[in-house]
Image: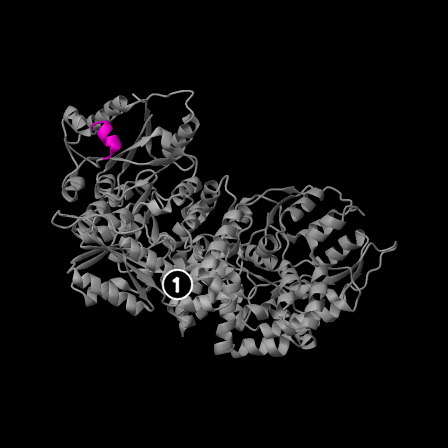
Amino acid sequence: MAIAKLKQDINSALNNDNLTGALGRFGEAYLPAREKAYEGKDFAAIREQIKEIKSYAADHMEELAEQFAKQAEKNGAKVFRAKTAAEAKEYIAKVVKEHNAKTVIKSKSMASEEIHLNDYLLKNTGVDEVAETDLGEWIIQLCGQRPSHMVMPAIHMTRDEVAEIFSKETNQNLDPDIAKLVKVARENLRQKFLRAGIGISGANIAVAETGTIVMCTNEGNGRLTTTVPPVHIILVGLEKLVPKFKDVGPILEALPRSATGQKITSYVTMISGPTPAIDLDGNIIEQKELHIVLMDNGRTAMRDDPMFKQALQCIRCASCLNVCPVFQKVGGHVYGHVYTGGIGTILTAFLNSFEKAGELQNLCLRCERCKTYCPGKIDLPALIAELRRRTVEKNGLPMGQKLILEKVLTNRKLFHSLLRTASVAQKPFVKGNVIRHLPLFFSGLTEGRSLPAIAAKPLRDKVGHYVPKSKPKAKVGYYAGCLGDFVYPEQGEAAYKVLGKMGMEIVFPLEQTCCGIPATQMGAPEVAVKLAKQNIEAFEKEGLDYIVSLCPTCVEVLKHHYVDYLKNDPAWKERAEKFAAKVVDFPTFVAKHGNNLKFKKLFTKATYHDSCHMKRTLNVWKEPRELLNKAGVKLVEMKGCDECCGFGGSYSIKMPEISKAILDKKLVNAEAAGADVLALDCPGCKMQIAGGLDAKGSKLPVKHTVELLAEALDD
Amino acid sequence: MSVVLTKNPMDALYNEFKEKAEAISAEVHRVADVKAARELVTKIIKELGTNKVVYAPSELTQSIDVQAIGKDAGVEMTSENLRQNAADAGLGISQLDYAIAEIGTLVGNATSIESRMVSILPPVHVALVRTANILPNLLETIALYNNKLGELPRYLTFVTGPSRTSDIERVLTIGVHGPGRLIIVFID
């Protein structure tokens, strides 16, 4: 049921041109702005500092909270420790009632959204209004929506929609002129600031050492909220604590740069105690009431979880959303709660509902982009995968998936014979060498893209043990991967040709099978462990120097995941480590050992698509470009060359609509490059992009780098 | 009216500050002494055509003698009853303690209610800063306050350019809840 609702939300988001347009434009503008803001800064060093500060703070949450409370009270604030959302709301309502406030103004506080504070105050106190004062938040409040982005809450709306909303609010007929609309907001909210009895704000950082609250805003609403009303309540989650005042430095250097590409926000306010104020009658109050509500609401539970503790390193910059290809297509509302995107999925699990988050993890493509940009150095994709695993552990797998994973995937002979059968059974659906329409549950997969046919003869039947005439330089095990073996055998043949020319002896261990990534992605790691053992066994008996594969995801799994899966089994751990040490991706291997290769010029113009796992996980992107250059190919870079194509393995089956929307953007960029061929280094990306181009009627061929290299070899 | 002084050790920092602050829409001036500052502020007020100016009493507002400026410019110059007066004044004048060259930011102790009211409510803010107090970057500024944590102001403020928003369609608009103009006057 819940999944059906999610799918419905996704479809309506994908059909909302305002949303996808605004998000797409922002996604494009964000990266150069961010890069410019970080000029002259060492991002790697800053994020390392933040990680240290925040992980220390997470480990010492309770003592820092105590130190903060003590220090802030010494400074003259009243500190309340709230275990739950209910406790926080009750306390704040009590303060509001004590002061008999009629108007409350609030400046951006995600924590207050998290606990639905506005509603509570309206129902349980005598206030007439609780006004959001950030422009975006106010727009959202007036039309009864939820923020769709942590930093830009109304990014999904157009100026026309805002004009309509403001016209209704002010009983005027307003033009969709942004400068004028901003002025209307200024005038309207100004009156609210001036008559507010209480200001409520959030915090970006809370310093235990000095009892200081740090807050960043651009509009000045934060300054007004903390200055004009005679009472100030600060609602702050325990995750905002840092030990020392100097810890503010690195966080303040990263937060605005990562959030909006600014070097600093217009206003940064550091409050270390109550200040004077002027009451509603104009009298000076020497020391106003300052309340600080330190809220737990799931945060210590997060800290106590050995895996998810890492998520507390988040500084709420939302850059994980800004670079997420899925977020750029569907926006924040499909996430269903206040925190959205990658980090939102995780926060929702702990601060709102684990059930909901279990569904949301389905949105993640695992393109790993967020991980590269996170200033808190959080491994978001790993945490989302862990959510998936826990959801499956709790709810079990759907029957069909369970059957495929447990009975088919772990039985290599059955799996491979089914693939061979499929190559025959698919015949009615094949036209040329491409499947146009698939029956039954696969139908979503051919929506907007053609699928390649399963090859009549798999790679394993075409290649075997190759021994060069002269003394072999090294003995290489060839790992094909499912697509490389059964769908694109020509890529493997090309690889054999290149490796042969390099003077390598090549072995194709026949017992090799699926790397296991689909099982991990579906939340069945026990299946992946079985497959890991099968593959390690298949290769270790051959006495190899290297194990080479054309698929970056397979390389990642073989090289990095197996050791992790088997780390608690000493004997297997050692075998996995030895195995992993030999695994290398194809471009790196050729770049390193292929100096003897001679190429004739190809005179082709190629554009290159960086596969997510090749570029971000394996950090390989220079090598294929160098190899293509050597082969005489002229490279023309396409816009967004390292943006995900939307494949994501089983993702394209689970979320075909999103996958296709992301693909469409890639296709436009690919064709706009004006190249003769699109080169890439991942069979999965080839399936996605070539399928999309075919369905679109495009003539742009897609080739694995190895195919171009093989063509250029000088025989 | 602004003068550019040469061979001053602060020149490089000032130039960097000016470049960074202007890039985010602040207006930056530098004058040789309080007399020149007085003339510049008077001129600014006359150009604005406002009839009410609010100020936060401080060492620099006193040395440029804002009350005399008010008389010269023919405006009401006050720091009283600021809930009312700051809300309908055309300009607010306050002093800030430091400037950060790298990011074009002003920093200061804003604990007094006057300094906050006059710098955030009126549509224009004139900030007076001593040229000698320009610091190179944010981290050194944090370090400076960190060196005297016992004296940390209760309300420490960092101001960078005028108030801004991009909340509607990501279009940058200057001046939302805070001032739409930030005029910085460095006094040597």
Visible residue check, residue A514: yes
Residue occupying image coordinates x 82% and y 60%? A466
Q: Relative to the observer, which residue lies in front, A206 or A369?
A: A206
Q: Relative to the observer, which residue lies in front, A701 or A389?
A: A389
Q: Quadrant of residue A243?
A: bottom left
Q: Where residue B8 sits in the image (x, y, percent)?
A: 41, 23
Model colouring: one colour
Residue occupying image coordinates x 36% and y 64%? A337
The local secondary structure at tag 1 comes to helix
Range of residues picked out in magenta = B58-65
Q: Would you place residue A386 above or below residue A589 in this image?
A: below
Q: Quadrant of the N terminus of chain A?
A: bottom left
Is residue B144 inside the magenta stretch? no
> Furthest residue to the right?
A470
- The local crowd at label 1, few if under 14, some if 14 to 19, many if 20 or more residues have their Cα within 10 Å, is many
Looking at the rendered structure, the kind of residue marked 1 is Val
Q: Where residue A112 sits in the image (x, y, percent)?
A: 30, 61
Q: Quadrant of residue B80?
A: top left
Q: Would you place residue A581 above or below residue A603 in this image?
A: below
Prevalent SS, magenta region: helix
Give the labeled residue for mark 1: A334
Q: Would you place residue A556 above or below residue B83 in this image?
A: below
Residue occupying image coordinates x 43% and y 38%? B137
Q: Relative to the observer, which residue lies in front, A600 or A294?
A: A294
Tell which subunit mark 1 falls on: A
Residue occupying image coordinates x 60% and y 48%? A608
